[in-house]
Image: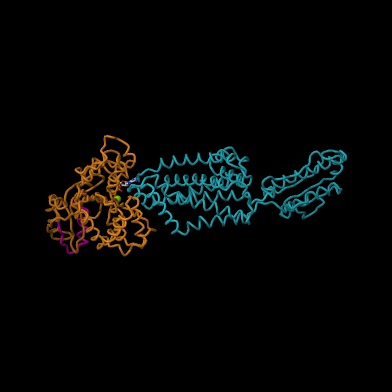
Chain colours: A orange, B cyan
Amino acid sequence: MRGRRQKGAEALAPDPDAPAIAAERLTRAFGDNVAVDGLSFTVAPGELYGLVGPDGAGKTTTLRMVTGLVGPDSGAARVRGLSAESTAAVVRESIGYMPQQYSLYGDLSVDENLTFFARLFGLPKAEARERTAQLLEITRLSRFGDRRADALSGGMYKKLALACALLHRPPVLVLDEPSNGVDPVSRRELWDLLHHFVHGGMAVLLATPYMDEAARCDRVGLLHRGKLLAEGPPEQLIRGFHHATLMLHCDDRAAVEGAIEARPELLALSPHGADLRIVVPRAAVGTFTDLGRRGPARFTVSEVSPDFEDVYLGLLADAEAA
Amino acid sequence: MSRLVRVRAIAQKEVFHILRDPQILIFALGMPVALILLFGYAVSFDVEHIPLAVVDQDHSAESRALVAAFTAQDLFELVATREEPASVEPLLQRNVARAALIIPEGYARDVHRGQMATAQLLLDGADNMSAAIALGYANSIALSQSLGRARVQLGSFEMPVEARVRTLFNPRLQSSVVLVPGLMVIVLVLVAVMLTALTVAREYERGSMEQLFATPVGRIEIILGKLAPYFVLGLVQVLLVLTTGVVLFDVPVNGSLALLFLIASLFLLAMLMQGLVISVVTRNQMVASQVAAISTLLPAMLLSGFVFPIDNMPPVLQGLAHVLPAKYFVDGLRGVLLRGNGLDVVWPDLVAMGLFFVVMLVVSTKRFQRRVA
Ligand SMILES: Nc1ncnc2c1ncn2[C@@H]1O[C@H](COP(=O)(O)OP(=O)(O)OP(=O)(O)O)[C@@H](O)[C@H]1O
Ligand SMILES: [Mg+2]
């Protein structure tokens, strides 16, 4: 509202050449707690960008600044060239947003939720009906139109939320942990849907704490304490990883774990069947090989190629140490 | 155009919420009827048949006339006569009597000499409502007795003054008649403030407010859409309480119904806004409902003049009563119902409620921003 009347200088039509989303040194603190700290990134049309980070990294706060729901202390978020703050009303028209929290109406049915949001977006009746039917079809919820939203499974609920966010055919989609609480089968379905829309030219910005999901994005930004640790396509981040991933083949996994877990070089450790998978600085590979030979708990070492989770855990450990 | 569509979408959604939560409807429509029946039949403020003990130490025609005057109507009922003043106190303590009339020796003599004749009335002050009414009644008896004596002494010509107690507008001093406006205020504040505070806080708590703010719907549209159904519900309650009052308790409707609904509407709007302010400030159903209960029920019961006269309160409470709309609502409503007042009389009440509404509107729109943090 405010934006429409304010600032004649600011263009009010979206700029087709601008990035779909541009975060420009976004900063926001809550009291002393800096949630987002000078964060910059862009998302192009037809790109699926994943903000990956642990709990409290600032993912939600970033997405809320992009959707104009939280004001930045400094910096700006732009959607198709328009400020999410001063031209919030125009920006809202071009964004579909799915919050992290359950936010549809549980006591309304699937159809009623969809109709409600269609009316808020001002869709004409016939068009609303057509799109609702179409979205129910592709999310495979057609049979559940009469079911109350709070009686849906986690996966069905998320698909409904996605359908509600897509009703007005937004060019930009913002999703906060879309597959939180969704079983693996539904999760795959959800991702197939996302890829379908991205291929159609939609820009998608999503936040996730899951590595397997991050690996399926076109580009990811590793977020830690409000700052980007690394950014790029997942394969590129894996290729550029400067630490080593080792598989420790143990006779007694628990004993080995006890012997090495306090070592300062250790960046990440996870059980892998009878083996242990660890991430260590390249310089420490020799130390661990020796350690395995001499005991007290014996193991043999082989280096394996890192996956995205190793990269994530390794970079996170670096950041924590710094 | 699309604004109207959005307001209607929100309002319709709210109606769904209301219809699907039976507790809301029971609360909103059952409670008024239950309250009015309870207050109308059980908790009567009517004062009648106060048990009276009499100590007549004078044994004269005059003293018997005084006792007769006291027991002539339904207010006092003679339950015991004693010879000694000391012996009535136990009766009062055991609640056998709630009032005692003590006529000392020499009463008739004093009356005849034209001196101040005194009789003593002991009242149980624990029930202050009855005591106050009984006292007023006793005074009027004393006055009429004195005037009666005056006539005897002055000879045969007609009395210039006649003492007659007449209560205007509510001749039988029926409390139910006074109660209906009072109940109306309780019912309306409970539903209007409580339900709006809850429903808006619920949107914050459940996260749906975040989803709403991400759509093109405007703040005013959200407010209008969410409050409209409760406004209608409030008017239904007014109708319900009024009908019950008229049918069961013979509450008169002396003024215009339209004016009555105008007063009720303005009060409702003020209360809806108060509920909105509470919910946008607290953003939490638990806290909102507690704040709503405290900030509405107490003023409605204590500061509206419904039970306790405002004039007898300490200045701070009087000041508070004059700021809150409850008093003006009860004032205006009683005026229209019982006295048949028109707009020319009740307009200050309307203005006062309107002012409160505007202040709450400003505060709520200031606090209700499209921001989740
Ligand atoms: N409204 C708020 N008030 C105060 N602090 C907040 C608020 N929102 C977020 N924070 C703080 O900001 C930091 C980042 O929170 P944010 O919700 O953005 O993280 P996140 O990456 O989304 O985490 P999660 O995975 O738990 O959702 C946290 O320390 C959080 O406590
Ligand atoms: Mg989050």
Query: Residue A180 in the image: x percent, y percent?
Result: 29, 57
| Residue in the image at 29% along x and 54% along y | A167
* Nearest to the observer: residue A121 or residue A277: A121
Q: Position of residue B39 (x, y in %)?
A: 61, 54
Quarter where residue A151 is shown: bottom left
Highlighted range, magenta: A246-265
Quarter of the image for residue B162 reads: top right
Position of residue B97 measured from the top left corner of the image (x, y, whole percent): 74, 53
Specify whether residue A312 is painted magenta: no
The foreground one among B23 and A268 is B23
Instruction: Tell whether A288 sits left or right of A38.
Output: left
Is any atom of residue A24 visible in this view? yes
State the count of labels: 0
Q: Check the picture and name the quadrant holding the C terminus of chain B.
A: top left
**For this view, does A8 lie left or right of residue B203?**
left
Q: Nearer the viewer, residue B360 or B103?
A: B360
**Res. A72 visible in picture:** no
**Left or right of B159 on screen, residue B196:** left
- Quick one: B150 or A122, which is closer to the camera? A122
The percent coordinates of residue A55 (x first, y second) are: 28, 51
| Residue for point 23% across, 51% down | A204
